[in-house]
Image (cartoon, rainbow, N blue to C red):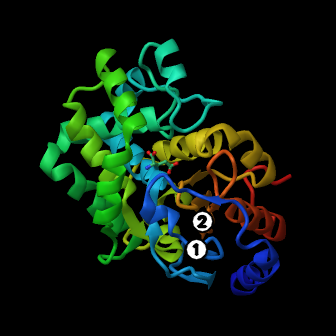
Amino acid sequence: MDFAAIVAEIAEEIAPFRGQGRVANYIPALGAADPHKFGIAVATRDGDVFSAGDADERFSIQSISKVFTFTLALDLLGESLWRRIGREPSGSAFNSLVQLEQEAGIPRNPLINAGAIVVTDTIVQHFDRDRAVDAILSFVRQRARSEAIAIDQEIARSEAVTGFRNAALANFLKSFKNLENPVEDVLDVYFNQCAISASCSELATSMLYLANSGEDPLSGDQVVSRADARRINAVMLTCGHYDASGDFAYRVGLPAKSGVAGGIVATVPSHLAVAVWSPGLSPQGNSLVGTLALEKFSAKTGLSVFRA
Ligand code: GLU
């Protein structure tokens, strides 16, 4: 398949839609993003990257970081992780408090904020507070093959200053005894992981282990077991877009995870990984133009887990 031509075609076709959607503005550093930006990168298992638009510009990965922490936690804890988190779609907003109260402090899945905070707690528990951020960052750098990936300190600080809902979720979890470490420590690591900056090219490369049965195809490292890779893809497919996960599965049909700064990563198991970025969001908090680009990608290539 001529991926260079396909991504160039997609960039051209989405051009009239650039600028649509609402840029996240809960912190100034995200609110300042240019809604006209658009990048797309496809990384194949033999190490090629095909990109178009602003694919090499770094942006805040935000909730895409939840895939990396979920991977680390599942690998560390195995099945016992599921005593503390479910694996069902939430049908609710990313930061909803109501469900957590109703369901006695067991978050629906690891890709909503409450679940991701529990996941981060397991990482803090394992690596201890001071090493947890480094462990997450070095995992991302290794997978993306880029030592230049870093945490945007301004974003990390602003997340902490405005993170009242996340603090509420963490306190709720603590009250239900589903947080082992101090709330402040877990939130600090969570805000730092959200503030990691990476480009579409780096993110597409970083997801290759999920497109290759858990093995990083470039280094040969078995990052997670084949079974866990399948499970992570399944949770991404069903839960990766908050309360728009069904719509994304219908339109694109790929395991994927979105972030509130407009990034989306998707995997085509046994083939490749793809990342898009465009800051304008849908009302559910997923990149509007990014989703459109991925819809075009699966239509043009026929690559979808539901391929008939
Ligand atoms: N930092 C954001 C939050 O926790 C991440 C949400 C997202 O990317 O969807 O509120």
Q: Element under label 2?
A: loop
The reply, left or right, for residue 304 in relation to residue 152 is: right
Determine whether 79 is above or below 220 in the image.
above
Q: Nearer the viewer, residue 12 or 164?
A: 164
Other residues around mark 1 within 10 Å, as few (<14) / some (14–19) / many (≥20):
some
Q: Which residue is mark 1?
A: 34
Mark 1 C-beta to ligand 1 under 8 Å: no
The reply, left or right, for residue 27 in relation to residue 98 is: left
The image position of residue 225, as x and y in percent, is 42, 47
The residue at the point 62 percent across, 45 percent down is 241
Residue closest to the far right: 308
Q: Which residue is mark 2?
A: 279
Residue type beneath disc 1: Asp
Other residues around mark 2 within 10 Å, as few (<14) / some (14–19) / many (≥20):
many
Determine if residue 188 is in view: yes
Determine whether 102 is above or below 130 in the image.
above
